Amino acid sequence: MEIKKELGLTSAPHKLRTNYRNFPMVQKVVFGKGSFDQLGEILLPVRKNADAPVVFLVDDVFEGTGLIPRIPLIFNDQIIFISAEEEPKTDQVDALVRKIKSDFSEVPSGIVGIGGGTLLDLAKAVSIMLTNKGSSAQLQGWDLVEKPAIYHLGVPTLSGTGAEVSRTTVLMGPERKLGINSDYTTFDQVVLDPDLLVGVPKVQWFYTGMDCFIHCVESLNGTYLNAFSQSYGEKALELCKEVFLGDLNEETAREKLMMASWHGGMSIAYSQVGVAHAMSYGLSYVLGVKHGIGNCLVFAHLEEFYPEGVTLFREMLAKNDINLPQKVCSKLTEAEFDTMISISLSMEPLWENALGKNWLEKIDREKLRSIYEKI
Amino acid sequence: MEIKKELGLTSAPHKLRTNYRNFPMVQKVVFGKGSFDQLGEILLPVRKNADAPVVFLVDDVFEGTGLIPRIPLIFNDQIIFISAEEEPKTDQVDALVRKIKSDFSEVPSGIVGIGGGTLLDLAKAVSIMLTNKGSSAQLQGWDLVEKPAIYHLGVPTLSGTGAEVSRTTVLMGPERKLGINSDYTTFDQVVLDPDLLVGVPKVQWFYTGMDCFIHCVESLNGTYLNAFSQSYGEKALELCKEVFLGDLNEETAREKLMMASWHGGMSIAYSQVGVAHAMSYGLSYVLGVKHGIGNCLVFAHLEEFYPEGVTLFREMLAKNDINLPQKVCSKLTEAEFDTMISISLSMEPLWENALGKNWLEKIDREKLRSIYEKI
């Protein structure tokens, strides 16, 4: 149904031709403890010449750590440290592209993103904007990218967002938060080294993992799902349960969460999120709450929509000693509640996925208000 | 350990650098009932000019059926019908390449394989040999292909082999049955249309599905496994259980078996098969038994190695009313038994994966003889 919408088609799916999304996959992937050290070998055939550098965009939490000397710098390669404190922005992408263009006489051989969803999304966007004109804000949307990106490689150091495998890069633009969703966005190469998750703070580990878990609950309970995405979503959900409710040793937990994120990201191909994402967008807009925690704050109060998922989520909170912030919405004004509710209700495909075509009969402003008040 | 072997390395894995396989994935995939009709649209940007055709290699069971008019022929495109009665051969690949080169003035724009594992493997091999010199037999082995293949697209019409997603094409050569295993082997595009499984004979549906099931049991119980392949293998196994032991409607069963094969194929990346494959190679060599049924014949008697898997397999046989051929080895001569056992024991990595480094202490010729005699 989502795809029908995009094509502006209204007839029944089985009568349509050319109506399924042709999904690009990451071209190459390596998985293994310590595989980060293969980066040099992997990049060698990518290098065009000594003047065309590889630019590494690295989460600044790694500045001064033992990871940095392991980055295989040669020629005029450059490391740019970037804070992931705030979500990635179109301005930031454009500034990075200007800097790279002014620093080097040639287009880089490749962009490598090392970090969580923010760094991975920045690497994708920068690699696109090095070959396409204008501002990245102009390419936010569906299939607006004209030219292939330069080679880009992702190295996740946090797991749960699925950014390492998805065909989008979600950016905060001047007008809206929206993905540059295109076949050229997907990484050419991903390096999955579970050892890079060593040292992730417990709270961040949890909220990023819940990004995957909540996504899966929403998509598996949605009406847009097909068997392709279902199989990936089910596996990701299963792995999340093992990680957050099982008694795995830390090494196994890292490996499994990394794979949960990977499969969860793949499940996006033919699925859509639901009530938690619709409501957390409102929360983020008004309160600036970050994506991972915003989803959790909302999801905890969605037992009516996702009874099994919310039960599991509460068990995960308890088992992992996570205390969700309380009374987050207690001081909001009427106007702020109104904005939050309007933003949430504007996410039509998410509501339709969650509640069906007649979703407007099943939800109203009062209902959303009552849920937001609990948060 | 497998990878260590390939590199000739002997130190412990955690001390190694650059030791994990960098695995190529299918570049694009579309999934959905009726997605076959998107083939024309998908091939359009692939076409180089009116003289560079798309060549369709099609299982000859489809000759004269309704599928053929749906193949999007334009310009000088060609359909070549091929029997899948016998396993694909290097001679056959070389003959197809000669024919295509003599029929057309230009290198084709692409090769499309439509069929089961045999047709998919032929399409992969032909696309490689159109750009590489010599006979396909010379490229059997690991990473011997020098030049990228031409564009190749796979459309599975049987599910279970994983050929649609793997980086190999297994061919019977003049000296040995072996894969052309290379980064260039993997398909550029796969079209997964579950409706193409409509009408697969029940016995073929079962044996091809068991190719996936047995592969998963062997790899999940092997010593070579890592978390990447484990997650894919577990999901494939789960889907096989649903398909062959559940009470799904036919449409759902087709979708789930198609995804089981896909995930099973992906799980090959970092895993290895085991006792069933080692012994079925011997069986195939001496008796010419086909791969799918050969694995089943052996696997039924491997309860000692795979107790849970064999129990499930027997339930699947019963539930699906499949009667395995009996007394297959009853008339073999001593010399034939000897050959069969020797071929099987020569599959060292398979035995090591199944039984560990000291596998030679756990198995001997008498043991294999006693198992073969039961078949």
Image: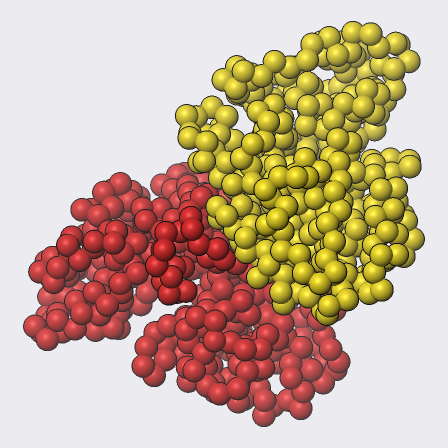
Chain colours: A yellow, B red
| Residue at 8% over, 60% down | B366
Horizontal arrangement in the rendering, residue B242 relative to residue A96 (left or right): left
Please tell me whether residue A342 is drawn above or below residue B69 in the rendered image: above
Q: Quadrant of the C terminus of chain B?
A: bottom left
Identify which residue is drawn at 39% across, 39% down: B246
Query: In this view of the protein, which residue sits in the foreground, B349 or A51?
Result: A51
Task: Give the camera-side residue of B31 and B4.
Answer: B4
Residue B45 as seen in the image, left or right of residue B290: right
In this rendering, the count of numbered labels is: 0
Q: Position of residue A71 (x, y in %)?
A: 63, 51
Q: Is residue A38 above or below residue A213?
A: below
Q: Is residue B295 above or below residue B72?
A: above
A71, above or below A81, in the image: below
Residue B120, horizontal then vertical, whole percent:
49, 68
Res B278 → quadrant: bottom left
Residue at (26, 63) in percent of width and height: B348
Answer yes or no: is residue A62 visible: yes
User: Residue A225's spot in the image, x, y percent?
Assistant: 62, 39
Q: Dividing the picture into quarters, in which one does residue A173 lie?
A: top right
Q: Image quadrant for the N terminus of chain B?
A: bottom left
**Near-viewer residue (B133 or A17):** B133
Quarter assignment of residue A10: top right
User: Is residue B251 among the parts visible in the rendering?
Assistant: no
Residue B12: x, y in percent? 37, 51
Which residue is located at x 78 percent, y 7 percent? Answer: A330
Q: Which is nearer the eye, B292 or A148? A: A148
